[in-house]
Image (cartoon, rainbow, N blue to C red):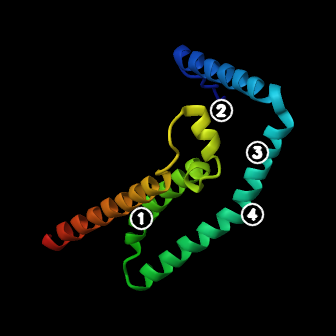
C-alpha cells in the first residue's frame, strides 16, 4: 500500500512558513547581542527545571495523590494542581519583581513603583485556590443531589 504525504491546505503551509520565519528572525535578533549569555541562560534554565524543580513538584504531586487517593478522593487532586500550576507560573514569570531584586531597575525604566507585586501575587494565588475550592464544592453538591 502506497502512503500519500499530507501537507495541509495552502493557508496552513503559509502560516507555518511565516511562523518559522518569525521564529528565525527573533532567534537571530536575540542571539546577535549576547549569544553566549542567552545560551547559558537557556541551558541553566533547563538544568534548573530538570534537576531541581521537576523532582520537587513531582514529589509534591505524588504526595497529594497518595494523601487524597488513600481517602478515596483522588479526583480532587486536579482542584489543587491547576491553581498551584498557575500560581507557580506567575511566580516564575514575575519572580524578580515579587522578590524585589530588580526594584530599582523597574522604577528607573517605567517610572512606576515596584511595591505591591508580592501582595498581588498572594492575592491572585488566594483567588485561584478559592475559585478552585468553590468549584469543588459545587461539584460535590451537584453529585450529592444525584
Q: Between label 2 and label 4, give the one nearer the viewer.
A: 4
Whole-Å distance between the Cαs marked 1 and 4?
24 Å
Q: Earlier in the sequence, mark 2 or mark 3?
A: 2
Residue at horizontal 80 percent and vertical 29 percent from the top:
31
Separation of marks 1 and 3 at Cα, in angstroms: 30 Å
Left or right? Give the position of 119 relative to 132: right
Q: Which residue is mark 4?
A: 51
Is the C terminus in the top left, top right, bottom left or bottom right quadrant? bottom left
Q: Residue at x 84, y 33 (%)?
A: 35
Q: Residue at x 42, y 66 (%)?
A: 80
Per the image, the residue denoted by label 3 is: 42
Disc 4: CA contacts within 10 A as few (<14), some (14-19) or many (>=20): few
Q: What x and y, as percent, mark residue 5? A: 64, 25
Secondary structure beneath label 3: helix
**Mark pair 2, 3: CA separation:** 44 Å
- Mark 1: secondary structure: helix
Amino acid at each position: 500500500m502506497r502512503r500519500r504525504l499530507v501537507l495541509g491546505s495552502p493557508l496552513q503551509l503559509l502560516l507555518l512558513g511565516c511562523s518559522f520565519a518569525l521564529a528565525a528572525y527573533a532567534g537571530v535578533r536575540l542571539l546577535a547581542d549576547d549569544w553566549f549569555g542567552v545560551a547559558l541562560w537557556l541551558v541553566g534554565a533547563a538544568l534548573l527545571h530538570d534537576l531541581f524543580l521537576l523532582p520537587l513538584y513531582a514529589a509534591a504531586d505524588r504526595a497529594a495523590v497518595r494523601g487524597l487517593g488513600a481517602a478515596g478522593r483522588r479526583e480532587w487532586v486536579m482542584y489543587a494542581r491547576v491553581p498551584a500550576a498557575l500560581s507557580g507560573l506567575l511566580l516564575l514569570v514575575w519572580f524578580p519583581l515579587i522578590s524585589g531584586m530588580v526594584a530599582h531597575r523597574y522604577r528607573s525604566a517605567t517610572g512606576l513603583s515596584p511595591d505591591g507585586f508580592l501582595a498581588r501575587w498572594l492575592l491572585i494565588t488566594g483567588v485561584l485556590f478559592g475559585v478552585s475550592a468553590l468549584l469543588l464544592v459545587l461539584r460535590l453538591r451537584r453529585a450529592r443531589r444525584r
